[in-house]
Amino acid sequence: MTRPFFSIIIPAYNAHETISACLNSVLSQDYEDYEIVIIDDGSKDSTKDVIDTFINKRIRYFRKENGGASSARNYGINKALGKWIIFLDSDDTIEAKSLRKLNTLIANNSSADFIVTPVKSVTPNNKNTHLRQEKATLIDKKDAINSIIFNMPSSPLYIPRCPGGKVIKHELITKHHLLFDERLKLFEDGVFNIEALCCSKQVLFCNLYLYNYNKNNPGSQSNTFYPDIARNDDIVYQTIGGLLEKMGYASPSFPYLCLELFFESSFAASREKVKTKEKIQKIKKYYHIYSKHFAGYIRLEDAYKTLKVVYLLCRIGAYRSLLAFYNLLYKSLKRRRKF
């Protein structure tokens, strides 16, 4: 097999209901120089049987013990042969003609080693729109990093943290030994993308919707809240803080991330089965760690409403009121099956 231009890495775990649509969206492309690398992360359902119905030489199937999405993506990186890497989740799809359009973008922008396109959130009542008129431009990688850290759809340049909508030169990944952090349950994709951006030479942004994100999957990691999130957030904080320090870059978005991490960690502390005093002590501890970065540095109008309430309650030391607020939030999330 000659080296393909694209390697599309698909981690799959118990994906028998969605993997067909995912694979069909790739196999129906009008461009043929690609391979599909499926990493079955120890599925316990009929995922393999569904994949076996697709007879295509471009599909390379691997099965491993369950280790999570990061582990599966890392396995896929090590197996991929393509010059460019695309990550596609098994419950998502890509638009028709996406690969041909990406190939043209790369041919016309040979200096770029990291390509970003917007991600379309798709639900049963919100089908994807037609592709926009193509407009591609090189952007400063610091702007891309800020966008991923800030994670606000209303910002002028919005780049989501997810792997979707990113096309990364394989050589960039292998040269800098880039892998997803398998210790992380959340934000592992954001950390990976930020690490890749730090190492990149040129970042190309194209305003075409090529990637469809399935927002309606309640079992996805992004729709799950983990009670032990504090350890996860500490790794994110240390990793991204270290990357920015290594770059010598004081990111204006970092305070917003620290506020978000404080919220997640302190919310998790509020759900622990310990005395109220111990919960407050933990929340104060997290506030001490993170607030030195966000207190006085953020514009509240740019923060989510929930984060504004948390921030203001902590500023006045109303920790018991904060616990009551968290309790209401917990009940709301539980009704929506996100906890």
Image (tube, rainbow, N blue to C red):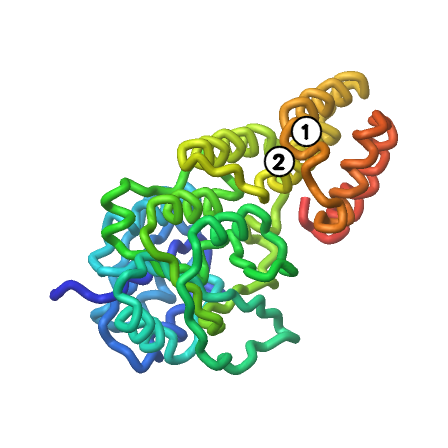
Task: Please tell me in which quadrant of the rendered image residue 140 appears.
Answer: bottom left
Mark 2 neighbour class, 10 Å CA radius: few under 14, some 14 to 19, many 20 or more: many
Closer to the chain start, of discs 1 and 2, is 2
- Is residue 30 something one can see in this rendering? yes
Of 294 and 279, which appears nearest the observer?
A: 294
In the rendered structure, which amino acid carries the disc numbered 2?
Answer: Cys
Numbered mark located on residue 258 in the image: 2
Decide if residue 88 is on the left or right side of residue 77.
right
Please, is residue 241 above or below residue 10 in the view?
A: above
Q: Do the residues labelled 1 and 2 touch (CB within 8 Å)?
A: yes
Query: Which image quarter: residue 175?
Result: top left
In terms of depth relative to the viewer, which is nearer, 202 or 309? 202
- Residue 291 in the image, given as x and y percentages of width and height: 68, 29
Q: Which residue is drawn at 55% across and 46% down?
A: 149
The x and y percentages for residue 48 are 35, 60
Which residue bears the numbered disc 1? 291
- Which quarter shows the C terminus? top right
